[in-house]
Image (spheres, rainbow, N blue to C red):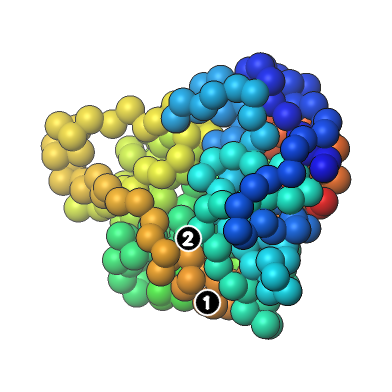
């Protein structure tokens, strides 16, 4: 079968198309779409958050057909960039949900649902969403808007900010505007880390809350518990997503933004686009 291999860590070109043995198991999915997460670009580069053994077929989330059923599945971190995949946790796709939308919601939807549960947002709170045009960010904008919050979407380009506005962000700002310290927020969803997260922390009002879940900048937010205590800011921690988070994401009527689609053999181009920050919303591979 066709697949994409990672045989050594490196740049996007380290992803190479080739043949692979058929997967074994009782639940072999004929894959139609595979999602790409930013974490997968870090794994490919050799700086991922968990160890992997090479060679491997990357890819954690897929959608396709299993015994006549439309399903999505999380594959425990490997095997998704291929025509067929086996193993992992399988979910049936609701009849009214397109399969590509279900794949786009598989990882990002369960994350966004987990985060908003932990946030316990209150109506009227000013909520800042960093990376508001990303896969998780676009869903957080929608969920925070539904909770009655005043949503401020932060993104790097005007096109991305317009996308956040179309999904429910009352205001949008660029990252440079955070440094000006003019806006105070009650809550921050931080999927960026680094200096951007530091600027967002500084813009929180006393008694505010911050939840860091990603490091698109390459590093986590470097904010100590002592600093947070000094400003009466609560740094919120979450556990791991559970099955019900995925099930809720698939049935919540969320609109995933699928900004880019690449054929399987161009997985390297998909990774390059994500690392160049030229993508909006979710990036999918079409098999």
Q: Is residue 119 above or below residue 253?
A: above
Q: Residue at x 29, y 66 (%)?
A: 120
- Compare residues 255 and 58 and report the one nearer the observer: 58
Tags 1 and 2 touching, CB below 8 Å: no
Which residue lies under the disc numbered 1? 252
Which residue lies under the disc numbered 2? 110
140 vs 64, left or right, is left
266 vs 48, left or right, is right
- Compare residues 49 and 92 and report the one nearer the observer: 92
- Compare residues 182 and 193 and report the one nearer the observer: 193
191 vs 3, left or right, is left
Q: Secondary structure at mark 2?
A: helix
Name which quarter of the figure residue 231 lies in. Answer: top left
Q: Is residue 147 above or below residue 237?
A: below
Percent x, y for residue 232?
A: 16, 46
Percent x, y for residue 40?
A: 59, 35
Percent x, y for residue 227?
A: 19, 32
Q: Secondary structure at mark 1?
A: loop
Please state, as top left, top right, bottom left or bottom right, where the N terminus lies in the image.
Answer: top right
Q: Which label's residue is closer to the chain start, 1 or 2?
A: 2
């Amino acid at each position: 079968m066709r697949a994409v291999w990672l045989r050594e860590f490196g740049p996007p070109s380290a992803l190479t198309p080739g043949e692979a043995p058929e997967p074994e198991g009782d639940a072999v999915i004929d894959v139609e779409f595979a999602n790409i997460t930013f974490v997968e670009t870090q794994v490919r580069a050799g700086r991922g958050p968990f160890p992997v053994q090479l060679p491997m077929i990357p890819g954690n989330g897929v959608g396709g057909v299993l015994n006549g059923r439309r399903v999505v599945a999380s594959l425990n971190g490997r095997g998704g960039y291929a025509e067929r995949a086996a193993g992992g946790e399988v979910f049936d796709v609701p009849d009214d949900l397109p399969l590509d939308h279900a794949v786009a919601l598989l990882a990002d939807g369960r994350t966004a649902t987990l985060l908003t549960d932990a946030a316990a947002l209150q109506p009227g709170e000013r909520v800042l969403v960093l990376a508001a045009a990303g896969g998780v960010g676009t869903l957080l904008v929608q969920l925070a808007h539904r909770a009655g919050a005043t949503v401020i979407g932060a993104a790097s380009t005007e096109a991305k900010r317009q996308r956040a506005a179309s999904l429910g962000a009352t205001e949008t700002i660029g990252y440079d505007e955070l440094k000006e310290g003019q806006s105070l927020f009650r809550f921050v969803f931080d999927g960026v880390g680094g200096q951007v997260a530091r600027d967002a922390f500084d813009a929180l009002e006393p008694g505010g809350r911050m939840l860091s879940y990603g490091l698109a900048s390459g590093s986590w937010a470097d904010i100590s518990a002592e600093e947070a205590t000094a400003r009466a800011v609560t740094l919120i921690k979450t556990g791991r997503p559970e099955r019900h988070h995925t099930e809720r994401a698939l049935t919540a009527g969320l609109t995933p933004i699928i900004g880019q689609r690449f054929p399987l053999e161009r997985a390297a181009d998909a990774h390059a686009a994500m690392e160049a920050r030229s993508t909006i919303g979710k990036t999918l591979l079409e098999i």
